[in-house]
Image (cartoon, helix red, strand yellow):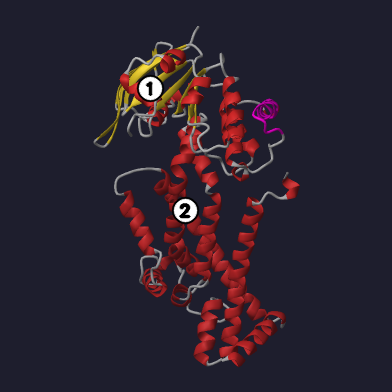
């Protein structure tokens, strides 16, 4: 069955500030969807709600037609944070953490970790201290950690922000390899990255969805004036 | 002044290597009461700190504030209070803890409780949000999240406990009032220093002070060394 994620009338407030307003979105299948928007548009908050890390004030999230709560969302979705967070242990322990929770056997964990590290270009990094690795390496470790869990929804919050072009390319290649395997929602304000990676694009502005379109349509023929301004760098924020 | 210090060092070395059993016994008693006191305190301080550091509830800030302000409680005031409780007519007089090493240990366990609670709760609280999110998004339950945070902050806990040990090891009020500074019974390093100073034997007092400082420094340095080895990527770990 094709995966189907539906967000219905999601709202989120921080005190008197409305961060997300009436978010309605449906993602069918294993697509890569880019959440585009200016800083503070609400991309991260939306990702955190889909990841089950934040409670929504209103609205519902359905996965394959079933209403899901935060705990259920955490079983199907994994978020890679913009600012990488590592446990203060080895790279191996960081990668093994989620697999152990899922009851995998040690030899399976070892094999899968070795394979995944190879995929993200960090072969033989198992024994290194995760926090002693570079920013680019940490982001790749974080991606590998998420890939290993085979999530049905992979959420990426600005995965290449502040990284050098080499690291960014490796990470983009790793994201491309997930195509067809899971639904990927990628928050970014990097238009070129969205062009390269996304099948569909969702433009959020001040907590509201302004436009949803295929990547080609979004960049070549935006329907909304706000999106056109955003693409042309004319949107004041 | 310089002569006294030089003489004190000579005397300290002499005392350490003289084979004087009372000196060793005094050091042992100090280590015993503070070690036991710190361990006892950990039994309740770490669970309290865990609740304060990891859970949210009304008046949490007030409880944390009370523990923080009690860190600097004067040891003589606490000693006096404990004396009243442990004395023959006191509520805990039937336990016969007054003028015993166990009595001092219990006093020190109370003395260091605010320190362990405050430092540990603060470490757990500050490590909380990002690590909790990470553990959660990797599929951890609330219990596993808390365990992950505790594992991450274990070293801060060790430092809190070692600071508590140092606080207990160097305190005088509780040891003097609850212990009574009884020769070969409850005399510890700090009470020995006070006694020798009162008697005018400054070199002996200074020698005891040097032994006390040496022990505190050795323990602190050893803990720092272990932490350094833990943090560093040693060649043999690669």
Which disc, if any, is residue A28? Answer: none
The magenta stretch spans residue A121? yes
Q: Is residue B198 above or below residue A68?
A: below
Q: As drawn, is B55 to the left or to the right of A101?
A: left
In terms of secondary structure, where does tag 2 sit?
A: helix
Q: Chain of mark 1?
A: A
Q: Residues within 10 Å of mark 1 (few under 14, many from 20)?
A: many
Assign the C terminus of chain B to one quadrant of the image.
top right
Q: Residue tagged by mark 1?
A: A203
Among all residues in the image, which is located at the extreme right? B236
Q: Residues within 10 Å of mark 2 (few under 14, many from 20)?
A: many
Q: x and y percent of residue B46 in the render?
A: 47, 52
**Magenta residues, dominant SS class:** helix
Alpha carbon distance from label 1 to label 2: 44 Å
Q: Residue tagged by mark 2?
A: B120
Name the residue: 56% across, 33% down.
A142
The magenta stretch spans residue B186? no
Among all residues in the image, which is located at the extreme top? A1
Q: x and y percent of residue A22 in the render?
A: 29, 21
In contact (CB < 8 Å): disc 1 and disc 2: no
Inspect this view and state whether residue A126 appears: yes
Name the residue: 59% across, 90% down.
B2
Magenta part of the chain: A108-123
In terms of secondary structure, where does tag 1 sit?
A: strand
Q: x and y percent of residue A188 in the render?
A: 45, 28
Q: Nearer the viewer, residue A229 or B16?
A: A229
Q: As drawn, is A149 to the left or to the right of B15?
A: left
Q: Nearer the viewer, residue A79 or B188?
A: A79
Name the residue: 49% across, 38% down.
A83
């Amino acid at each position: 069955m094709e995966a189907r994620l539906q967000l219905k009338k999601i709202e989120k407030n921080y005190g008197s500030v409305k961060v997300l307003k009436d978010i309605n979105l449906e993602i069918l299948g294993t697509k890569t969807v880019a959440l585009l928007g200016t800083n503070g548009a609400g991309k991260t908050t939306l990702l955190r709600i889909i990841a089950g890390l934040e409670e929504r004030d209103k609205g519902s999230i359905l996965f394959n037609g079933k209403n899901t709560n935060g705990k259920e969302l955490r079983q199907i979705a994994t978020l890679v944070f913009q600012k990488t967070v590592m446990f203060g242990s080895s790279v191996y322990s960081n990668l093994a953490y989620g697999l152990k929770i899922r009851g995998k056997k040690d030899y399976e964990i070892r094999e899968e970790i070795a394979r995944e590290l190879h995929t993200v270009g960090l072969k033989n990094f198992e024994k290194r201290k995760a926090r002693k690795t570079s920013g680019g390496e940490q982001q790749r470790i974080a991606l590998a950690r998420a890939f290993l869990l085979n999530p049905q929804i992979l959420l990426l919050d600005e995965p290449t922000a502040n990284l050098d072009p080499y690291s960014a390319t490796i990470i983009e290649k790793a994201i491309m390899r997930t195509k067809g395997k899971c639904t990927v929602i990628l928050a970014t304000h990097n238009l070129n990255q969205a062009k390269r990676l996304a099948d569909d694009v969702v433009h959020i502005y001040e907590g509201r969805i302004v436009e949803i379109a295929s990547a080609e349509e979004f960049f070549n023929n935006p329907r909304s004036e706000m999106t056109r301004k955003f693409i042309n760098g004319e949107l004041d924020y | 002044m310089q002569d006294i210090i030089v003489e004190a060092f000579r005397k300290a070395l002499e005392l350490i290597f003289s084979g004087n059993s009372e000196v060793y016994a005094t050091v042992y008693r100090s280590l015993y009461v503070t070690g036991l006191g710190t361990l006892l305190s950990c039994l309740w301080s770490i669970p309290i700190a865990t609740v304060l550091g990891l859970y949210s509830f009304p008046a949490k800030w007030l409880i944390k504030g009370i523990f923080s302000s009690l860190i600097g409680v004067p040891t003589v005031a606490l000693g006096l209070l404990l004396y009243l409780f442990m004395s023959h007519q006191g509520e805990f007089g039937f336990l016969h803890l007054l003028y015993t090493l166990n009595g001092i240990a219990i006093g020190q366990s109370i003395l260091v409780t605010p320190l362990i609670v405050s430092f540990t709760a603060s470490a757990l609280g500050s490590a909380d949000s990002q690590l909790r999110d990470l553990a959660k998004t990797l599929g951890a339950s609330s219990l596993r999240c808390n365990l992950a945070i505790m594992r991450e902050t274990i070293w801060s806990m060790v430092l809190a406990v070692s600071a508590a040990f140092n606080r207990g090891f160097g305190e005088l009020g509780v040891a003097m009032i609850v212990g009574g500074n009884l020769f070969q019974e409850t005399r510890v390093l700090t009470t020995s220093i006070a006694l020798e100073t009162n008697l005018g034997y400054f070199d002996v007092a200074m020698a005891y002070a040097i032994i006390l400082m040496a022990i505190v420094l050795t323990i602190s340095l050893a803990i720092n060394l272990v932490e350094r080895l833990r943090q560093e990527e040693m060649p043999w770990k690669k």
